[in-house]
Image (spheres, rainbow, N blue to C red):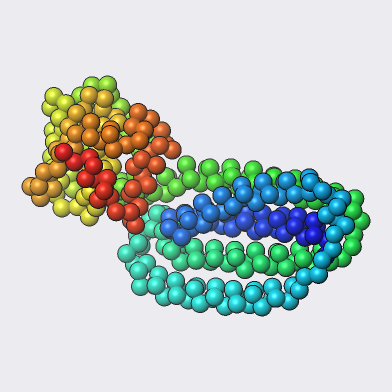
Amino acid sequence: MYFRRFKVDSLQGIMRVTLVFLALSLPLIYSFIARFFTMFFIIELFVVGIWLFSAGRVGEERSWKETRSVDFGRFKKLLKVMWICFGVVQIFFLIYNIFTAENSWSDSLYGWFSVAGKFLSPVLLAVFPFYIKVVEKAGKNASFEIDTERFFIKRKIHNYQIIIALTIVFFLSYVMLFFTVPAIARTAPDYPSVTTHDIRDVYSFKTSGTGEDTLPSLFENLPGRQSLKRAEAKAGEFRVEYDDTEENIDKLIIYNSAAAFALTDKLERIVFVFSEVETVIERESFIEACSDFENILDSDNWYVEIQSKMSYNIDPEEFIERIKK
């Protein structure tokens, strides 16, 4: 087996498979599994890409002449086991989602995408058997002698194709994550919720004052507005009362406090009232709990500081204790 050919063909095959599965994961982004795989694929593309484009630059002639014997029959056995495991996992997730999908269903675009993500995202696990398949194929192809010059020309063409595909997929990823996903989220029956709200929707409420004119309207456009009972701003303090809400109260407090303090420069204190129980949040405490509050309204910082804490599997208790008075 010509080892350099095997290495390059394997990496190119892995890159192609990863690009295809990254594109498939984007429409399923409302699933936690799909979001995990999307990040995994993006990181993998960078790592494998660096490895691929550095392959062959050192000791090309020496490595080209090296040969070794590899038993690729073992790969077939491994591939069978992986496909069996894949099938078992699909059956498990199918049964699980049949019993739980009703909680995510709604007659809206968001509902369709949420349910599709639940049912289809486990299919992304098929990427691992495909990785083994392309490695096996590369090993077999590298067992036959071909013209060295022809190999280098073929490798360059495939690398250019991968670069073009990378550009297209990353452009689609950008459009999907920053434009399509927020637009779909707005069709959710409970929009805005802490998991679907887009902070860019309320940038227009930014003020350098105390917010007496803007805060009531701001909270009518923030998560929890469906159960908003009373809102009053006075001299740098804002008091807001809610009826019973399906939102996680701690997450609602974190999200709405962040939005209010970031958009209202002279707001110093917020009093949240749920079922006659008051929770007081001071501006100073909130700023100290954040690592970069000054730039919190930037999309990337907002996700790191606030939005990432809104995920259903994240416990906000530690953060909420840091910001409470």
Residue 321 image offset from top left, x and y in percent: 21, 45
Determine the residue positioned at 46% across, 60% down: 33
On screen, residue 145 above or below 317: below
On screen, residue 180 above or below 259: below
On screen, residue 273 above or below 80: above
Residue 136 image offset from top left, x and y in percent: 73, 68
Q: Nearer the viewer, residue 11 or 242?
A: 11
Determine the residue positioned at 12% across, 27% down: 234
Left or right of 234? Residue 264 is right
Residue 310 image offset from top left, x and y in percent: 33, 49
Q: How many marks?
A: 0
Left or right of 12? Residue 225 is left
Residue 80 image offset from top left, x and y in percent: 63, 77
Left or right of 44? Residue 320 is left
Q: Nearer the viewer, residue 5 or 29?
A: 5
Q: Nearer the viewer, residue 175 or 67?
A: 67
On screen, residue 134 above or below 307: below
Task: Name, please, the residue furthest toward the top.
Answer: 208
Residue 137 location, quadrant: bottom right
Quick check: can you spot residue 313? yes
Determine the residue positioned at 54% across, 75% down: 85
**Quadrant for the C terminus in the image:** top left
Left or right of 217? Residue 62 is right
Quick check: can you spot residue 191? no
**Quadrant for the N terminus in the image:** bottom right
Q: Nearer the viewer, residue 256 or 114?
A: 256
Task: Name, please, the residue furthest toward the left.
Answer: 276
Determine the residue positioned at 41% across, 75% down: 95
